[in-house]
Image: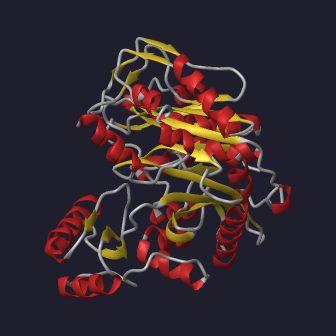
Amino acid sequence: MFEKILIANRGEIALRIHRACREMGISTVVVHSTADANGMAVRFADESVCIGPPSARESYLNVPAILSAAAITGADAIHPGIGFLAENASFAQMVEEHGFAFIGPTAEHIRIMGDKISAKSAVTAAGLPVVPGSEGAITDFEDAQSLADTVGYPVLIKAASGGGGRGMRVSRGPDDLKDAFDEARSEARSAFGDDAVYMEKYLEKPRHIEVQIIADQHGNCVHLGERDCSVQRRHQKVIEEAPSPSLSADEREYIGNLAAKTARELGYRGVGTMEFLYEDGNFYFIEMNTRLQVEHPITEMITGVDLVREQIRVAAGLPLSFRQEDIVFQGHSIECRVNAENSETFAPCPGTITNLHVPGGLGVRIDSPIYAGYKIPPHYDSLLAKLIVHGANRDECLMRLKRALEEFVVEGVDTTLPLHHRLVREPEFIRGDYNIHWLERVLADRKS
C-alpha cells in the first residue's frame, strides 16, 4: 500500500480524498494555488505545496509543478481528483513515466474514452447500445445533411472532445442545420482546441442514467448500481439520486451487468461511470467518465462502499475487496449541489462567507471545504457544498432532504439553496416524473 499520496486538486474533492487517505493510514500532500492557501484540505494535509498563482493554467494544470511537488515530498502516488487533469491521458502517462502510481485508469483508456467517437466505437464492439448517429467525426456539411435525413430530425450535434454542454447544438429541421453545425464546430474549437463534431438522434424526453463501475488489475469488475442525473441546467447536473425512480429492478440489473461486462472486456482499471440516455425502456450509451464523479457519495450511501478507498486500493495493485454478490443496495439517496451562484440569474458570486450552519442528523452528509470566514475565489468552479441525504426509501429521503435544506445556512454570498428549496417541493420531482429537459422548463415557467 502507498505511504504518501499527492492530491492534485482543490476544494471539496481534495478534502474528500484526504479523509479517505487518513482513514487508511496514508500521509497526504495537497498542492494548491496562492488563492487556495487557506483551503480546508491544505490546512488538514500532512504537507502542502504551493504550485502557482490563482490561474488554473499556472497551478492545477501545471504538470511540471505537480510532478516536482510529488518528487520533493517523496509521494508514492498522485490522485488527480475531479476536473483539471483527472481525464488527461498525457498527464496520467507522465505520472507513471516519472515513477509515481496514477490513481485512475490507464492513459490508453482515458484517451479512448476522452474522445466520444472512439468511446462509442469501443463500447459498441463490446455490445453496448448507442444513440443512432454518425460513426465518426463529420467535417462536411453535406455529409451532415445526408445523415440528418437518414437519422431523422431533431438531431444533436456534439463536440467529439470535452463535455459540459459546450460544443452542443440541436437542429430541429433542415432550415437550422447549417447554423447548428457551424456553431457547434466553432464552440468546440474554442473550448477544446478541436472542432471535430458528430451527430446523434435527439431524444425528446430521456432520463440521464449513469452506472458506477469499479475494476481491479486482476480481471474483476463490479457495478454499484445507477444514479439518475436528469435534473440538469444547460447540461450541468443540479440534483442526483440513487437509485433512479424510473427503472424497474430488471432494468437496473440489466444495465448494471452490461456496464460491468463491457468494462471487463475492455480491460478497464479503476473507477468509472458509464452514462446513458434512457427513454421508453431503452438505454443508449453516450459517454464514459474515467474518474471519480462529483455525485459519487449517493452511491456510497446506498452501498456502504467507500469509492475513494477502493480506488486507492486498486491503484496499489490490490484486488477488489468485494464481489458483485456482496453488493446490497439499501434505501435511497439524493444529492444537491450547492453553488456560489445567484439562484435567479446563476451568475457566480465569489466573496466571503460570513456565517455558516450546516445540517446534521441521521442520514445527512455534507461534503464541503467551506467555513465561516472562507473567501470563495473567483477563479474556479462555483461548487460550495454537496448536501447528501439517505433514507430507508425515497419518501423518507425526500422528507429528510427538505428538513436538511431548512437547516442549511450560508450567509455573505448568494447560493443556489433557494433553488433547491423550490425544486424538492415541485410535484413532478416528488413523483420522480422528470427528464433532462424538465429543469429548463421549470426555470422558464418561473420567468414567464
Indicate the position of residue 442 as horizontal and vertical percent values: 36, 41
> Can residue 419 be seen?
yes
Looking at the image, residue 228 sits to the left or right of residue 57; the answer is right
Specify the quadrant of the image occupied by residue 102. Answer: bottom right
Residue at the (50%, 63%) spot, across then down: 94
Indicate the position of residue 337 as horizontal and vertical percent values: 48, 36
The correct choice, above or below, for 184 with respect to 139 in the image is above
The correct choice, above or below, for 294 with respect to 136 in the image is above
Residue at the (38%, 43%) spot, across then down: 59
> Can residue 99 be seen?
no
Query: Foreground residue, 228 or 68?
Result: 228
Most extreme residue toward the top is: 355
Specify the quadrant of the image occupied by residue 30. Answer: top right
Looking at the image, residue 27 sits to the left or right of residue 276; the answer is right
Residue at the (65%, 50%) spot, across then down: 243
Specify the quadrant of the image occupied by residue 351. Answer: top left
Q: How is the image coloured?
A: secondary structure
Looking at the image, residue 30 sits to the left or right of residue 156; the answer is right
Query: Foreground residue, 228 or 73?
Result: 228
Looking at the image, residue 14 sits to the left or right of residue 444; the answer is right
The correct choice, above or below, for 373 with respect to 180 in the image is above
Residue at the (59%, 45%) spot, across then down: 241
Query: Foreground residue, 192 or 226?
Result: 226
Indicate the position of residue 212 as horizontal and vertical percent values: 64, 57
Indicate the position of residue 85 as horizontal and vertical percent values: 45, 54
- How many numbered discs sit on the rendered protein? 0
**If the image is split into quadrants, where does the C terminus sit?**
top left
